[in-house]
Amino acid sequence: MSTAINWSARVGTRVQSLQEYAPEPLEEIAERLNLPVGQLIKLDANENPYGPTPHALEALSAFHAQNRYPDPISRRLRRAIGGYLGMDAAHILVGNGSDELIDLILRLFRPDSTRQRAAAADNAQQDAAATGIGQLLVCPPTFGMYEFYGATNDLQVLSIPRAAAFAVDIDAIEALCADDPRPRIAFFASPNNPDGALLPDATLERLLALPLLVVLDEAYVEFSTSNEEAVCPSRARQVPAHENLIVLRTFSKWAGLAGLRVGYGVFPKALVPALQRLKSPYNVNAIAQTAALATLEDLPQALVVVDKIIAERERLLARLAEIPYLNVYASQANYLLCRVHGLPMTRLCAAMERLGIILRYYEGPELGDCVRISVGTPMQDEALLRVLRGLQQEERAS
Ligand SMILES: Cc1ncc(COP(=O)(O)O)c(C=O)c1O
C-alpha cells in the first residue's frame, strides 16, 4: 500500500546541494579509452605505484580471521603507531582512512540541535550555548574533503584563499579572528594538496595562538625531508604540548594501502574518549589493521620505497622544468603540480589519454591551467615525459 509520501523529496537540502564524488574506476577508463587496463598509467590520485611492502603482502595472504570482528579500538595498531611516532598511544585514534577522521572531528564539534540544547538546559548539565563549533575555516586551493565534510555536518564554511605560490594568508586569518574571535575549526594540509608545500613553522605558530582548533593533515609528510636534519618534519609530536592541535596521518600514500583505508589522528588526550564514543564501532576492518601493523613491522622496507619515490620526484621535477610550456612547483609530497601555458589543456589531456596516462586536471580560475602529476615508477614517468616532449615538438612545428 502506498503511503503517498514522496520520500526522495524529503532528503535534506544539505544533501541536494552536494556533488557526487565518484572518480572513474580503472576498468571503465580502459573501456572509454579503448585500451587494456594493464596499459594505463594512473598518476591522478597520489597512490604508491609500488604497493604494500612484501611483509604486508604476506600478512594479507596469511589472514584467516574473516569471520571475526576486528578490535574496535585497534589496540595493537595504535601501540605500533605510538612506537613509530615515538608517542603515547593514548593520543592516537585509527580511522577508515583519514577521510573518516576529518568527518569525525567535525561531527565531534557539531553544534547541538535546539532540542538537545533545551534538554541540556533542563537538566542543568552545562552551558549548552557554549558547546559546539559552527564555523569551518579552509584555505583553498587545498584538499576538497574538508569543505565537503563541513557541508555534510552543517558547518558554515569560511574560505580564505591562499596568497601567491599557495602560501596560507595568515594575516587575513589573524584579521578575521581579531574581528570575530569565536572558536573555529581550521584544516591545513602539510604538504598541501595540490602544490606540495609544507606549512611553515612560523605560520603554524601564529595559527596555534588564535582561537582555532588547527587540524594539520599530514597525509604526505613521509615524503617530506625539507628540514635541516633531512628527517620527516611531522608535527605529530607537538600535539601533547597544544590543546588546539590535531595531526592526521594515513597509510594510503607512503605505505601503499589506499585501497584498505587506514588513517589515524594524533589528538590532544582530552578529546580521545569522546571520539572513541562517537566513531562507528568497527570502523577499521581487520584486514586493514593487519596490513598497517605488518607495514610498521617492516618499516625499513617501507622507507626504502619512500626514498625511491622521493628520488624519483626530484628527477621528474628536473625533467619537467626543462619543458618550456610548464611551470612546475617544487613539492614535498609524491606529486608535482604544473601550470601549463601556451598549450590548451584539452590538447594535453587528449595526448595523455591516447597513451592511457591519467593525470589530475582541475576546473576554475585558480587551477584551471594546472595539472597534478603523481610520481610514478621511472618507466611510467618516462612515458609521461615522452608525451610532453612530443607536444613541445608539435608546438614548434605548428
Ligand atoms: C591532503 C589529503 N588528506 C587526506 C587524504 C585522504 O587520505 P585517506 O586515504 O587516508 O582517506 C588525501 C587523499 O588524497 C589527501 O590528499
Image (cartoon, grey):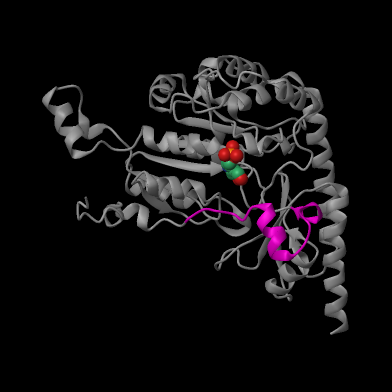
Q: Is residue 361 shown left or right of residue 365? A: right
Residue drawn 53% across the image and 36% down it:
205
Q: Does the magenta stretch include residue 259?
A: no
Q: Residue furthest bottom?
A: 398
Q: Residue furthest left?
A: 122
Q: Which of 337 and 382 is in front in this view?
A: 382
With respect to residue 328, does 293 lie above or below?
A: above
**What is the span of residues highlighted in magenta in the rendered image?**
20-42
Whether residue 202 is visible here, answered yes or no, is no
Q: Nearer the viewer, residue 281 or 76?
A: 281
Q: Nearer the viewer, residue 177 or 384?
A: 384
Whether residue 242 is visible here, answered yes or no, is yes
Q: Quadrant of ligand 1?
A: top right
Q: How many numbered discs, if any?
A: 0
Q: Is residue 35 magenta?
A: yes
Residue 116 x %, y %: 20, 33
Residue drawn 84% across the image and 73% down it:
392
Residue 100 x %, y %: 49, 36
Q: Is residue 297 shown left or right of residue 395? A: left
Residue 328 x %, y %: 75, 59
Residue 352 x %, y %: 77, 65
Name which quarter of the figure residue 77 lies in: top right
With respect to residue 112, does 276 lie above or below?
A: above
With respect to residue 114, does 140 lie above or below?
A: below
Q: Is residue 151 shown left or right of residue 139? A: left
Q: Quadrant of the C terminus?
A: bottom right
Q: Which of 20 and 114 is in front in this view?
A: 20
